[in-house]
Amino acid sequence: MARLTLRNRRPTEERYSWNEYTEWVTSGAFRFPTGMATTYNGGKGEAFTEDFAGYAHIAKSHGIVAACLAIRASVFAEVRFRYQQMAQGKPANLFGDATLDILERPWPNGGTGELAARMIQDADLGGQFYAVRKGNRLYRRRPDKMVIALTGEPDVDEYVDVAGYLYYPAGIRPGGQFYVYDVASVVHWSPLPDPEAEYRGMSWITPVLREIRTDRAAAQYKQDYFDNAASPNMVVKTPESVMTREQFDEFVERLRREHAGPGNRHKQLFLAPGSDVEVIGANLQDLDLSNSVGRDEARIASAAGVPAVLLGLKESMQGSSLNAGNYGQSRRRFADGTMKPLYRSAAAALEKIVPTPAGTRLWYDDTQVAFFREDRKDAAEIQQIKAASIRQLVDAGYDPPTVVEAVDNEDMARLQHSGLYSVQLQPPGTEQQPAPVP
């Protein structure tokens, strides 16, 4: 990395060490222009350590993983982002204005739904989503082409911070060309932190790679089973005195030709005199392959934060799992435990690139998400209960503003009595005056 200094208005070039470079960037003395090209000479940073292309292949070829990705993306893509006012530290009204157009139209022919789908896709496969704003457009950056430049070494220095982001269009490699982005210009969303990194995220697929491999192995076993005439493995024993080596080889070749493969199912088997057949291994029922595969599928769904009931997996299609109440609880668990935390963290990451007005924050609006309609019904019932509580407390003589505050904060200690009693709210000792005669 080169630096330029002005001496008597004549530029000269000197060399920065990596530590000097990161200190220079974070000190605010200089800001790299977004998209400035340079050459990587080594340094400390955090990059994607898994195989992004391999994870993408899993997403395209593994049915359960694809189903988990699809349901996460379909619900996440329904979100809309709005500003939320903060009144005395509490969330208040949602509103939007023209400054949110960058999220409504992030790129040509793209909307908020496509932006959200890309965000959750990169986060699921690469552990994080990167985007750079240039003007009124967002540019997505693949996770496996980004490096998080650090101000020091996590294993040596006491304080380590993010110095910037390096983007390698042709892939990360020593000596490859990259572009430097300022911290303030990059959206970095990592909903699942990597326990071995300071700032990098992790894909939820990583912990269940073994289950994915065993599930694929089971699928391959079934394929091989049917390709082998849907029959168990066999050993054919022939006494040595019955035939010569040449005759035995010819017998084996003919047996394979006429009885092995998917086109030779259920054919009768005729053996040479003195031959014996012994079945080894087991068929699909003996292996209990269905239950084994079901357990792997359930673990994969659990890692994705998607209840098995929502995916229709075998483990959920029996017993009490089919009850309507259990389905409703699974749906609520997915909404409250998986999707809403993703919405919150995504809004916090995108807040960097929108001019958030003072006293507000970037938040999400899920009122139009069809998946949350049952939650809206529950919220309405809760509001009805709160309204009844407010009415009862006001009728009992408590000061109305304190009643609303106490019910809203679920803190009865905030109630203050008005000194009036009974439904008429008359001062003590006051006699009821008769109504005037018209």
Image: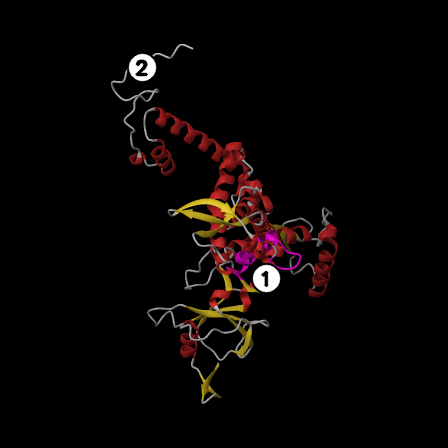
Q: Tell me the tag on residue 248.
A: none
Assess whether residue 129 is covered by the magenta stretch: yes
Foreground residue, 182 or 312? Answer: 182
Q: In the rendered view, does 196 fall on the left or right side of 59?
A: left
Q: Earlier in the sequence, mark 2 or mark 1?
A: 1
Q: What main secondary structure does the magenta stretch of the protein show?
A: helix
Q: In the rendered view, does 367 fall on the left or right side of 108?
A: left
- Mark 2 neighbour class, 10 Å CA radius: few under 14, some 14 to 19, many 20 or more: few
Most extreme residue toward the top, as rendered? 437
Q: In the rendered view, does 177 fall on the left or right side of 391?
A: right
Pick the quarter of the image with the C terminus. top left
- Mark 1 neighbour class, 10 Å CA radius: few under 14, some 14 to 19, many 20 or more: few
Three-letter amino acid code of the residue under disc 2:
Gln
Foreground residue, 25 or 396? Answer: 396
Residue 288 pos. (x, y %)? 55, 45
According to the image, label 2 marks what residue? 432
The magenta-colored residue range is 106-130
User: In the rendered view, would you say 390 is above or below 33?
Assistant: above
Q: In 3D space, how far apart are the residues under numbered discs 2 and 1 (Cα atoms)?
A: 69 Å
Q: Tell me the tag on residue 136.
A: 1
Assess whether residue 37 is covered by the magenta stretch: no
Q: Can residue 329 be seen in this snapshot?
A: yes
Find numbered disc 1 in the image and state the secondary structure of the residue it sits on.
loop
Foreground residue, 215 or 48? Answer: 48
Three-letter amino acid code of the residue under disc 1:
Asn
Residue 248 pos. (x, y %)? 70, 61
Q: Residue at x 67, y 48 (%)?
A: 230
Q: Are marks 2 and 1 in contact (CB under 8 Å)?
A: no
